[in-house]
């Protein structure tokens, strides 16, 4: 539940039990599929198969799991009664098939008992069971085990129809089955492998029903073999003009093997409906741009669902995870973290109550054509929801909200800042505890004081205000959620709101408090958004459409009582989606396709390729596209001194998963071989083999969407991964062309914001998905900047870095202050990446934070991690050099 991607790299292999019965090494099914000519002429195909399979008398018992299913028959009616048969008289599925009659009974004059009449309702119910069973078998051979059952269409059996007729072509492939390797059906075989067999007409009807069921799932059926296993005898009543005659029939009993597989022609998904580069949903421009042709004017397409990305931020113990649990599960908290248990990923998070990792969840909103009816909230409390694919299906054509929880303790500053800068969230939900200004110790769920959370050295530190100031500096679209309303007194709540309103007004933001609804709230009430809540949320959303930065909505909530949870749902349903900011300048053309890598997943070592996740900034990404991946380090890199997340060198034989979020964390001995055609290659060719948008398998990803992508190296590129560790790291990009990489860049800051920085200092910079250590080279005013700086060579930048390294030794006071005596409003500061070059866009926002040092406090116990502050300096990249 906590991950955005569920993948099994080694699903069960589809293999036929006929090839080597009684052994554990069956032959792969691909080599046994008949050609179209053989299937068109059954006699030729049967003769070839009969010679190979006539010695097989039974199969191994049916496996409990895997893509192989044994069925005695697939009839929707009872089997006929045989007077004699040479195979095993196994009584299959007694409620559907009566036992056959023996010859001795007929000799005594006993007529076979006619089978019981089966109604259409009974046949339809059996058809539903068989189709669901087929879907489960197909999922067994799929790496992605989550398929939506809500979009499953069961073939209907009309009242007057005695048999099922398959459609002329398969329907749309069910989401989640794109990577399925298929399923094998052994028809006429009992569960223990005994051959029972079917008459020829019964076998043909069973195969016909299988084709009809497969077509509803977007699959086709190939008959691999039909083998006679015995003889049978029965009597048929023939009605003539005057009397009824009984005719004796003799025939063969047949066993068939059928291969059900996804049809490639039906794999087209809804996202492929549009052939333009237009984003699939409407944006609201941050700069109030209403120009024609701007993406803000695009209308929502009927085939896609709006996707809103939201990050939860705030101080530790402010109730972020609890709020996310209540929103995604409709569970009221008990004051001890009941609703957040499913959100946590580590044991220490459960025991301490402090989140240290990023957790993502998906919520959907389903709208009806009737505007007066309430909006349904689609989450894990909804019926028929077992995963994100079901939420996708049930939310159409409404909205999806992708919520990311993050850490709040300064000890996990890296995780907290990544949640705000990475993933490019549309909105940030800043959580502030209502009892933060008073002592509520002794009550369940009370917020600890700063001294209890951070230590005695920082007893007066206001962590909630530090998170608020950071969000305001980053100029993020913001919603403030006051949590734990049930614990706050009237005076304490007034004090919290006074500090909050003062900070927002100082930053030029207009606060708007949404009124609370009255009355008690049950868990069932949180599954719908009432008309009153929607009306209040739409008033606020109207103010945000012109400028999402001007207004900050404030919602007062309680996860214990359910106060204003539905109102927060209404706000998430109505918030406008800000348009992506254009970072490119006139002289800096961005790649046509740019995908920022935010996380890397480790597959089994025998699986080819790698899996990465992130967001698409520009263009559209489709399965089969060949792009470049990088930048890779071109030299041996030593360990980075400021990498708190760097891990020690692993044994090359270690199978432990590795995830690198910092350049320089990879030891030089584990560098990959580069392409022989270019010794210092930073970009490597890769092909996209699979795409998932919020876990839903798709063929195309559009700009502004989050996705998980499977990539494999192309034939002329070096391998992407090695047995020792994954070489892809956070901060890399997947893009078209071979863009320029950056070793040195210049950023513009407001002079008052960078007063504490000094030339020669090491800092940590955050730019999009990049987090890296950089050194401050110089600082100058915009008027004094040389006009020809853009022509500087990379070697000059390296020399400057060395020159400023010696400057540190000459200045005993810690370096020359960046601002100094400069009185200009703006200041240009040059930075040089220490470990490796990165991809940086001109115009991108950069967050600079002090790197290293004691921070708030350094930690006194052995192994204790120091706590760093959230002070940062925000600017814009204006120049870059290779």
Image (cartoon, rainbow, N blue to C red):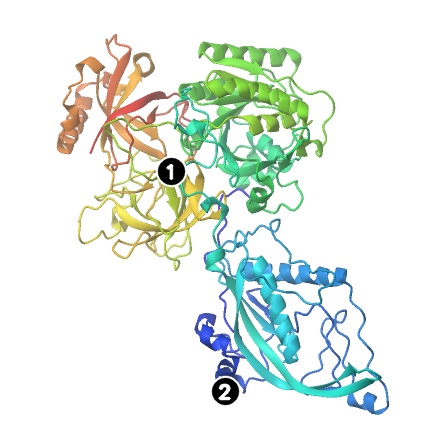
Q: Name the residue under label 2.
A: 51
Report if residue 804 is visible in the image.
yes
Q: Name the residue under label 1.
A: 645
Foreground residue among 194 and 533: 533
Answer above or below: position of 51 versus 91: below
Residue occupying the far right of the picture: 109
Q: Position of residue 746 (x, y in %)?
A: 24, 24
Classify mark 1: residues with Cα within 10 Å, few (<14), some (14-19) or many (20+): few
Left or right for 519, reference 273: right
Looking at the image, how many numbered discs can be counted on the residues?
A: 2
Classify mark 2: residues with Cα within 10 Å, few (<14), some (14-19) or many (20+): few
Q: Is mark 1 on a helix, strand or loop?
A: loop
Report if residue 333 is visible in the image.
no
Answer above or below: position of 178 versus 588: below
Q: How far apart are marks 1 and 2 (CA)?
A: 64 Å
Q: Where is residue 170 in the image (x, y as percent from the top left)?
A: 54, 59
Left or right for 379, reference 249: left
Q: What element carries label 2?
A: helix
**Quadrant containing the C terminus in the rendered view:** top left
Q: Earlier in the sequence, mark 1 or mark 2?
A: 2
Foreground residue among 293 and 704: 293
Q: Residue 713 carries which label?
A: none
Residue at 13% in and 31% down:
793
């Amino acid at each position: 539940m906590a991950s955005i991607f569920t993948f099994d790299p080694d699903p069960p292999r589809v293999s036929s039990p006929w090839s080597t019965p009684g052994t554990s090494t069956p032959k792969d099914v691909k080599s046994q599929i008949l050609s179209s000519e053989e299937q068109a002429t059954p006699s030729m195909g049967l003769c070839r198969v009969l010679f190979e399979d006539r010695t097989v008398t039974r199969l191994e018992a049916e496996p409990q799991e895997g893509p192989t299913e044994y069925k005695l028959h697939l009839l929707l009616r009872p089997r006929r009664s045989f007077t004699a048969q040479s195979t095993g008289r196994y009584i299959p599925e007694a409620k559907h098939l009566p036992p056959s009659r023996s010859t001795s009974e007929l000799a005594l004059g006993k007529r076979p008992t006619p089978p019981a009449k089966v109604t259409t309702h009974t046949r339809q119910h059996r058809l539903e069971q068989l189709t669901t069973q087929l879907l489960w078998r197909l999922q067994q051979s799929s790496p992605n085990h989550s398929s939506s059952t809500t979009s499953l269409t069961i073939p209907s059996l009309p009242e007057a129809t005695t048999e099922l007729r398959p459609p002329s072509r398969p329907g749309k492939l069910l989401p989640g089955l794109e990577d399925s390797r298929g399923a094998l059906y052994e028809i006429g075989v009992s569960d223990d492998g005994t051959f029972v067999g079917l008459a020829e007409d019964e076998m043909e009807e069973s195969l016909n029903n299988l084709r009809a069921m497969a077509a509803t799932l977007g699959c086709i059926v190939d008959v691999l073999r039909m083998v006679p296993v015995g003889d049978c005898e029965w009597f048929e009543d023939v009605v003539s003009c005057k009397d009824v005659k009984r005719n004796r029939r003799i025939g063969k009993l047949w066993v068939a093997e059928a291969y059900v597989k996804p049809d490639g022609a039906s794999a087209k998904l809804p996202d492929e409906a549009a052939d333009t580069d237009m984003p699939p949903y409407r944006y609201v421009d941050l700069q109030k741009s209403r120009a024609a042709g701007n993406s803000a004017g695009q209308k929502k397409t009927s085939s896609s669902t709006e996707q809103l990305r939201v990050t939860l931020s705030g101080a530790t113990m402010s109730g972020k995870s609890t709020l996310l649990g209540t929103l995604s599960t409709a569970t009221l908290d008990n004051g001890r973290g009941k609703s957040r248990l499913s959100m946590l990923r580590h044991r220490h998070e459960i025991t301490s109550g402090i989140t240290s990792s990023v957790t993502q969840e998906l919520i959907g909103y389903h709208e009806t054509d009737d505007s007066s009816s309430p909006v349904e909230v689609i989450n894990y409390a909804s019926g028929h929801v077992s995963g994100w694919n079901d939420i996708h299906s049930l939310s159409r054509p409404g909205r999806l909200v992708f919520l990311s929880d993050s850490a709040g303790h300064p000890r996990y500053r890296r995780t907290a800042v990544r949640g705000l800068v990475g993933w490019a969230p549309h909105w940030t939900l800043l959580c502030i505890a209502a009892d933060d200004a008073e002592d509520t110790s002794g009550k369940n769920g009370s917020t600890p004081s700063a001294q209890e959370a951070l230590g005695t050295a920082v007893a007066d530190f206001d962590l909630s205000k530090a998170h608020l100031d950071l969000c305001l500096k980053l100029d993020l679209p913001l919603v403030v959620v006051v949590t734990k309303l049930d614990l706050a007194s009237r005076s304490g709540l007034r004090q919290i709101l006074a500090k909050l309103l003062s900070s927002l007004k100082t930053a030029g933001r207009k606060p708007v408090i949404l009124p609370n609804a009255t009355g008690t709230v049950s868990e069932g009430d949180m599954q719908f958004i009432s008309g009153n809540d929607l009306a209040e949320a739409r008033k606020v959303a109207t103010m945000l459409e012109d400028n999402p930065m001007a207004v900050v909505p404030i919602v007062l909530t309680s996860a214990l009582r359910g106060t204003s949870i539905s109102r927060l749902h209404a706000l998430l349903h109505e918030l406008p989606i800000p348009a992506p900011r254009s970072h490119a300048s006139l002289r800096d053309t961005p790649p046509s396709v740019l995908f920022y890598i935010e996380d890397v997943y480790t597959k089994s070592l025998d699986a080819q390729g790698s899996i990465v996740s992130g967001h698409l900034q520009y263009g559209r990404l489709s399965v089969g596209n060949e792009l470049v991946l990088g930048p890779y380090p071109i030299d041996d890199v030593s360990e980075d001194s400021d990498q708190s997340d760097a891990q020690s060198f692993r044994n090359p034989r270690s199978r432990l998963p590795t995830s690198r979020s910092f350049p320089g964390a990879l030891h030089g001995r584990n560098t990959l071989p580069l392409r022989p055609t270019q010794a210092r290659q930073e970009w490597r060719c890769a092909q996209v083999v699979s795409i998932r948008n919020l876990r839903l398998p798709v063929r195309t990803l559009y700009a502004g969407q989050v996705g998980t992508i499977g990539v494999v190296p192309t034939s002329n590129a070096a391998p992407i991964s090695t047995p020792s560790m994954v070489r892809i790291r956070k901060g890399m990009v997947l893009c078209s062309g071979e863009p320029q990489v950056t070793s040195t860049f210049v950023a513009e800051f407001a002079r008052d914001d960078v007063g504490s920085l000094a030339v020669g200092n090491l800092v940590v910079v955050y730019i999009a998905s990049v987090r890296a250590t950089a050194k401050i080279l110089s600082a100058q005013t915009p008027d004094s900047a040389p006009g020809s700086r853009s022509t500087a060579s990379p070697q000059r930048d390296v020399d400057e870095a060395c020159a400023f390294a010696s400057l540190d030794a000459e200045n005993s006071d810690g370096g020359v202050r960046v601002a100094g005596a400069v009185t200009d409003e703006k200041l240009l500061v040059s930075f040089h990446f220490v470990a490796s070059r990165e991809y940086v866009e001109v115009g991108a926002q950069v967050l600079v934070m002090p790197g290293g040092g004691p921070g708030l406090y350094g930690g006194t116990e052995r192994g204790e991690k120091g706590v760093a502050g959230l002070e940062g300096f925000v600017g814009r990249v204006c120049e870059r050099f290779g």
